[in-house]
Amino acid sequence: VLYCAKIRLQRKWDENELAKMVLTVYDSLTHEVKIEDTNRAIAVIHKEMTRPLPGITVGLPVEIKVGPSLGKLKKLSTEEVNEIVKEYT
């Protein structure tokens, strides 16, 4: 599931240069995004990471963290993510 989302996200980034995938570790994807594009990128990432796959009926939770560096990431609450996604859909 993660690798399907990773491929979809990379295609999105290739199309619109909104973000750059800089690191993948186990079940984590790390992206570099301009500050002014952060909310739009969060909406795209959430959409692609939660998109259902054929034959898989169990939804997988997505945790989104943002910050100026890997050492200063802040986890967004579900409510914060939902507000951002609602703004861009």
Image (cartoon, rainbow, N blue to C red):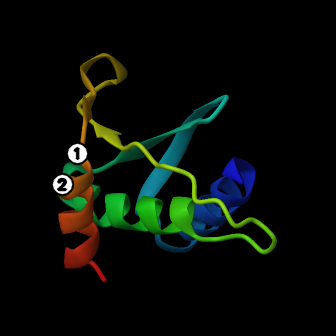
* Vertical side of 5 occupied by 23: above or below: above
Indicate the position of residue 86 as horizontal and vertical percent values. Answer: 24, 76
Residue 22 occupies which quadrant of the picture? top right
Locate the C terminus by quadrant.
Answer: bottom left
- Residue labelled with disc 2: 80
Q: Tell me which residue sits at (75%, 65%) in the image.
A: 56
Image location (x, y in percent) of residue 1: 72, 54
> Residue, x 43% and y 61% (percent of image)?
46
Residue depicted at x 65% and y 60% = 58
In this rendering, would 50 be left or right of 73? right
Task: Give SS at disc 1.
Answer: loop
Q: Nearer the viewer, residue 58 or 86?
A: 58
Q: Which residue is mark 1?
A: 77
Classify residue 23 as left or right of residue 78: right
- Residue closest to the far bottom: 89
What is the number of the mark on residue 86?
none
Q: Looking at the image, can residue 39 be seen?
A: yes
**In-front residue for pair 29/10:** 29
Q: Are marks 2 and 1 in contact (CB under 8 Å)?
A: yes
Residue type at mark 2: give it: Glu
5, above or below 15, in the image: above
Q: Separation of disc 2 and disc 1 at Cα?
A: 5 Å
At label 1, which amino acid type do we have?
Answer: Ser
- Image point (54%, 45%), residue name: 21
